[in-house]
């Protein structure tokens, strides 16, 4: 007998009929003799609808009240699923965050889980009950409702798997698993059978939407194996596990991309200690995320060029911030590009394999794709290119690294 | 400085714009220096939508899970209203049933309030905070969500007024107050300025939808004055108070009606003790509500005719139940009518006024409206007529008793 955490996302719960199908999946796993804890997201669209209501009332809607509002979405889906399970003759019960409780800190709208009380639910599932937990929500020590931020149900699932020490954590979603790249721009995308936490983290951070990056990170820290799989097909999906458990490592596991990037270059700043801090401090204070950063020193060693990328929607604000610091930074000029994409190859195997960088740049050059910036980590290489070339770049790299 | 309970119904909260308007009403009362507790229903339509989802999943949806589901409606409206108040610069906070807590018994889907903890909210409103409480919901001693049944937010409001000892309990709704009759069938309907609890109870039970009957009863028991008024006009509405506080009593306060009734007569049952119980026991066990009951003894004193009324939708079931008892009841035949209406005149003054009954029957006779059954109490007289004659009967009686 195993203890399982099963998490169902919003697209798996988008209609009442779909909720009934999910109930049947849960019943099957329960009938196999497993102890089951289910975590649900809100029905697809519910959270957006609530969010848009709050925005019509205030552009700066109170965080604590927003959490009360948004958490109602999971309250609906977990009671409906519990009702559907009871209709199938299963002993089932819904638990809201405050009922368990799932204690979080007080960062309303983006709280972190601190502790989950396991007594009541452990007792319930040990007596053949199926526990259905509302994802995305918790409660602060002052007993006000908190939420974990967008995609937070994945975090709930990983935390439940951790605190209840379940044998596995299965993330049911509307795709077959984690794919080598986005199938909407490359029909040759294939399901990855096994991927390491680190690779998945890069994939998730770089645009693969199948799992929330913070949830991947948490599962990595606590070494909780994740199984991302389809609600609809029943086939095995992708296992996210420790790198050392993966045999037959591929050099490159997947290709990720993100569109809507912009690049800013500050040309001819004085090359002295602290200049990078002077550039980035005011930008960071305005909640603008800096992605890639490249600093070149000019040939005479006196001046430097600083280049960085940001989200396109932050471009105007960023430019005006830098212009305000003109006197302090004492630069020659600013240049910028927008409509850029970042395309990344990811693979734990590239550490030990030479020639990956070379192969990537050559493949892109052969397709006449100009590289505007490069950033690397131990398990990924990202390049900045014109957005319109994204699809061509992804297809080229997908083929070049043997993923087709 | 007064302490006020203000309750807003679903039609007062049907859109985000309407919620903003309600926030302005609350702000005005707060700016006048009052301590304010607001109770909200779900946004109009929300509860029906959730109910229909549950019915698509199971015709017999689990009661406890239904309460989790339905209570989300008020969670949405109370957080949105709190957010709207905060946007207006007011210190406001939402409270869900379990957070206060509002303790109820364990009759899930139709619970009764046992106790409301007042400490936290009393402290909050004494420091100029506006407390916004989700109506309709509470929590059982095992800390599962309960609801109070349809229209339960009125019950929440009356209970809050009682436990917090507020100076008044104002029920904001989409009509001007309690009217002498339904304006959709008689344009001469007028707002009643003052009505006694007893009269209101009859009006509410007999079809006037402005306030939930149980809530009226609770306010009567605890002598809590109610003010039913319009969210939209700002004018004073109807005060529901003790009879002894009403001067200038009218003989008849209002005319109520309910359509969709059916009448069943069992002709020629043996007239012996227990026969009525034999008739009604199996009907009651099938959750069919009996309304009027008339029993006549035949001239020879051996046989009796029993006539009673039920909701039209229960007619077929009722007939088949009686036919099953044919042997036991030993009756001659059954007759039945459907498409009937019950029209009632209500007034505490009729106790001391002679001739009311006579006047009612004469007025209807003058309009050639045939009376099929009669039932009376100290403050009301109800007659059963053909449904198609409802409007004519209401208009005739409204005029005859000086309400035009």
Image (spheres, coloured by chain):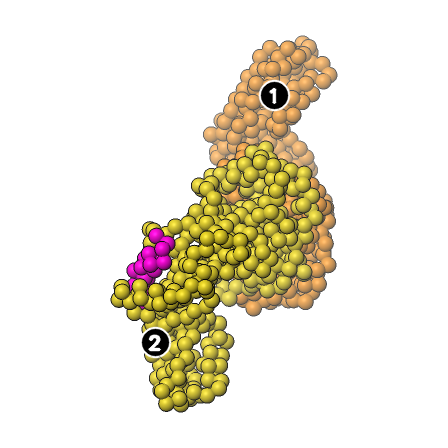
Chain colours: A orange, B yellow
Chain name for mark 2: B
Overall secondary structure of the magenta section: helix
**Image position of B287 (left or right of A401):** left
**Crowd class of label 2 (few under 14; some 14 to 19; many from 20; radius 10 Å):** some
**Which x, y percent locates residue A298?**
65, 13
Image quadrant in which you'd find residue A32: bottom right
Q: Nearer the viewer, residue A387 or A80?
A: A80
Q: What secondary structure is found at the residue carrying circle 1?
A: strand
**Residue named by callout 1:** A307
Q: Is residue A64 above or below residue A326?
A: below
Spatial CA span between label 1 and label 2: 88 Å
Circle 1 packing at 10 Å, graded few (<14), some (14-19), many (20+), is some
Label 2's element?
Answer: strand
- Could you say which is closer to the camera, residue B197 or residue A359? B197
User: Residue at (67%, 41%) from the top-left corner?
Assistant: B126
Decide if residue B323 is on the left or right side of residue A171: left
Residue B169 at x, y = what percent?
A: 56, 49
Position of the N terminus of chain A by quadrant: bottom right
Q: Which residue is depicted at the point 63% across and 15% down?
A: A325
Q: Residue at x 67, y 22 (%)?
A: A281
Q: Identify the residue at image location x=43%, y=47%.
A: B176
Residue A249 visible = no
Q: Which residues are magenta?
A: B385-404
Q: Chain of mark 1?
A: A
Q: Determine the image quadrant of residue A349.
A: top right
Please tell me the numbered disc located at residue B336: 2
């Amino acid at each position: 007998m195993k203890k399982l955490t099963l998490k169902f996302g919003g697209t798996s719960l988008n209609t009442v009929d779909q909720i009934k199908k999910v109930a049947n999946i849960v019943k099957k796993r329960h009938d196999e003799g497993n102890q089951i804890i289910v975590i649900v997201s809100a029905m697809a669209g519910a959270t957006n609808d609530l969010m848009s209501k709050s925005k019509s009332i205030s552009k700066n809607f109170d965080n604590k009240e927003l959490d009360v509002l948004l958490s109602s979405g999971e309250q609906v889906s977990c009671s409906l699923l519990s009702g559907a399970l009871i209709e199938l003759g299963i002993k089932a019960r819904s638990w809201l965050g405050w009922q368990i409780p799932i204690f979080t800190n007080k960062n309303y709208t983006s709280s972190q889980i601190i502790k989950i009380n396991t007594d009541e639910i452990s007792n319930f599932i040990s007596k053949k009950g199926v526990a259905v937990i509302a994802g995305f929500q918790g409660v602060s020590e002052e007993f006000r409702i908190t939420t974990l931020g967008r995609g937070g149900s994945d975090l709930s699932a990983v935390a439940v798997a951790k605190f209840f020490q379940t044998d596995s954590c299965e993330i049911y979603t509307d795709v077959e698993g984690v794919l080598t790249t986005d199938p909407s721009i490359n029909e040759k995308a294939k399901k990855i059978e096994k991927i390491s936490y680190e690779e998945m983290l890069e994939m998730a951070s770089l645009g693969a939407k199948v799992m929330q990056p913070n949830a991947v990170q948490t599962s990595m820290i606590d070494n909780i194996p994740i199984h991302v799989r389809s609600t609809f097909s029943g086939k095995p999906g992708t296992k996210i596990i420790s790198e050392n458990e993966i045999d037959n490592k591929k050099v490159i596991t997947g290709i990720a991309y993100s569109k809507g990037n912009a690049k800013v270059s500050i040309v001819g700043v004085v090359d002295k200690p602290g200049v990078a801090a002077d550039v980035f401090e005011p930008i960071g204070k305005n909640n603008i995320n800096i992605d890639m950063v490249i600093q070149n020193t000019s040939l005479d060693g006196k001046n430097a060029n600083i280049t960085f990328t940001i989200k396109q929607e932050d471009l105007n604000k960023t430019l005006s911030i830098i212009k305000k610091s003109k006197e302090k930074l004492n630069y020659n000029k600013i240049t910028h590009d927008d409509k850029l994409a970042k395309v990344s190859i990811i693979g734990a195997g590239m550490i030990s394999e030479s020639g990956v960088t070379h192969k990537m740049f050559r493949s892109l050059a052969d397709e006449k794709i100009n590289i505007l910036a490069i950033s690397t980590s131990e398990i990924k290489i990202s390049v900045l290119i014109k957005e319109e070339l994204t699809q061509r770049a992804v297809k080229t790299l997908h083929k070049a690294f043997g993923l087709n």
